[in-house]
């Protein structure tokens, strides 16, 4: 049906995809973690952030936490505390050889400690954390917004996030040799400085628009007029 409701368009292409998340991961040391990989619909190699579909019954934030765990073996400091509350003596690979868990077990802890998805007045999942004392109250997770990927054609919704101060959650996590799960394409993990990220973004090396948009939003958050670094600098002057 046309926008004015007066006509029926028989050949209008509308394709809805499962909602997805993209996450820009910045380590505790300040590096950005990206992939250099091949994708089915992109010629040659491309750089990309962490991303994936939101599972049925899963909130966007929980999906984002699951994806960075599965693909990089990392998460936030708050999430690591939650794991250690569940498994006293837990060793994430940087300890003294205590108890360890695999990715599936850690993912299960994250899921059980998270709230179910909430819907807005349009029936769409809300990307922000619920403001109650749970694992979702996490200062290292920044929600950058929800966006339609094709305004007149559907294409699903993208939820963009920035994870700051990322640390390993499982042994081997947060290293270039981490064997994460993916879509089967060949890939390598890269650690880039901010200048390298900005250069790659400007050169079009992130070859999907959703990736480029999420990176731009993250950089705006970090360095824009209301960004965290500007706020920190102002606070330090007082």
Image: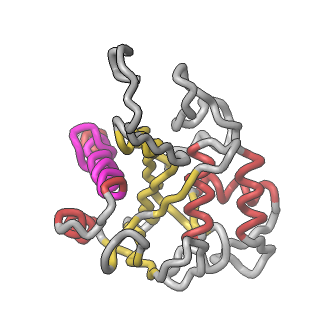
Seen in the picture, residue 133 relative to 21 is either above or below; the reply is above
Q: Quadrant of residue 3?
A: top left
Q: Nearer the viewer, residue 37 or 229?
A: 37
Q: Name the outermost residue toward the front.
A: 10
Q: Which residues are magenta?
A: 211-231
217 drawn magenta: yes
Q: Nearer the viewer, residue 121 or 171?
A: 121
Please report the residue visible at 70 percent of the width from the left and 42 percent of the height from the top.
57
Please report the residue visible at 52 percent of the width from the left and 80 percent of the height from the top.
175
- Report the label total: 0
226 drawn magenta: yes
Give how far across and how far down residue 113 sits, in percent. Answer: 74, 46
Give how far across and how far down residue 229 sits, in percent. Answer: 29, 48
Please report the residue visible at 30 percent of the width from the left and 39 percent of the height from the top.
235
Q: Give left or right: position of 165 versus 7.
A: right
Q: Nearer the viewer, residue 115 or 5?
A: 5
Residue 197 visible in the picture: yes
Residue 238 visible in the picture: no
Please report the residue visible at 35 percent of the width from the left and 35 percent of the height from the top.
152
């Amino acid at each position: 049906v046309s926008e004015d409701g007066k006509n029926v368009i028989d050949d209008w292409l509308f394709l809805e995809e499962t909602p997805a998340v993209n996450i820009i991961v910045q380590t505790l040391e300040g590096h950005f973690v990206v992939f250099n990989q091949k994708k089915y619909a992109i010629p040659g190699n491309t750089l990309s952030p962490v991303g994936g579909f939101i599972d049925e019954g899963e909130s966007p934030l929980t999906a984002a936490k699951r994806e960075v765990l599965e693909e990089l073996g990392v998460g936030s400091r708050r999430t690591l505390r939650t794991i250690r509350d569940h498994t006293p003596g837990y060793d994430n690979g940087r300890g003294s050889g205590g108890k360890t868990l695999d990715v599936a077990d850690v993912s299960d802890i994250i899921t059980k400690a998270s709230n179910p998805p909430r819907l807005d007045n349009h029936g769409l999942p809300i990307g922000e954390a619920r403001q109650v004392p749970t694992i979702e109250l996490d200062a290292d997770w920044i929600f950058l917004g929800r966006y339609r990927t094709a305004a007149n054609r559907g294409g699903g919704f993208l939820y963009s996030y920035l994870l700051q101060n990322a640390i390993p959650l499982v042994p081997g996590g947060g290293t270039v040799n981490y064997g994460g799960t993916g879509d089967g394409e060949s890939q390598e993990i890269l650690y880039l400085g901010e200048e390298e990220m900005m250069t790659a973004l400007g050169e079009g090396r992130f070859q999907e628009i959703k990736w480029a948009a999420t990176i731009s939003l993250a950089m705006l958050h970090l360095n824009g007029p209301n960004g965290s670094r500007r706020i920190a600098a102002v606070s330090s002057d007082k």
